[in-house]
Image (tube, rainbow, N blue to C red):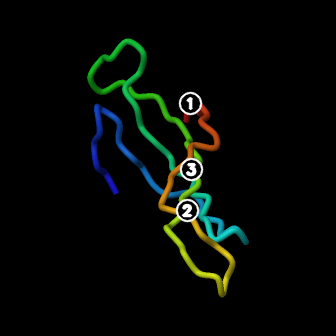
Amino acid sequence: MQAATYGWQSQRIVGIVYNNNHSYDISISLQVPDERNVPGNYAYDLVKVRVSPSCDSPKIGCSHGFKVEVLDYKHTNK
């Protein structure tokens, strides 16, 4: 997966965890331009997000809309 967004590029998904509240915690490695914004110079970061798909089911006890939360953001400097 190499979609560029404002100079950022996702490198790979490094982990997915299913939570018992019907959400997923996804860790993604990112390649971002360094602070000097020199072409070809990149820093590496790790972002962890929680994705909660929309759900309305009394059977499994959930009632919420779709949402994405940033849980953690780290500069890793590969």
Say which of marks 1 and 3 sits in front: 3
Where does residue 15 sit, x and y in percent of width and height? 60, 60
> Quick one: label 1 or label 3, which is nearer the N terminus?
3
| Residue 52 numbered tag | 2
Amino acid type, residue under disc 1 in the picture:
Asn
Q: CA distance from mark 1 to mark 2?
A: 29 Å
> Quick one: label 1 or label 2, which is nearer the N terminus?
2
Q: Residue at x 39, y 47 (%)?
A: 10
Where does residue 18 sit, x and y in percent of width and height? 65, 70
Extreme residue in the top direction: 36
Query: Closest to the observer: 18 or 55?
Result: 55
| Res. 40 image quadrant | top left
Left or right: where 25 falls relative to 54: right
Residue at label 1? Answer: 77
Q: Residues within 10 Å of mark 3 (few under 14, many from 20)?
A: some
Extreme residue in the right direction: 20
Amino acid type, residue under disc 3 in the picture:
Val
Q: Residue at x 30, y 17 (%)?
A: 38
Tag 1–tag 2 contact (CB < 8 Å): no
| Residue 49 numbered tag | 3
Where does residue 30 sit, x and y in percent of width and height? 45, 42
Left or right: where 7 falls relative to 55: left
| Res. 19 image quadrant | bottom right
Amino acid type, residue under disc 2 in the picture:
Ser
Q: Secondary structure at mark 1?
A: loop
Where does residue 17 sit, x and y in percent of width and height? 65, 66
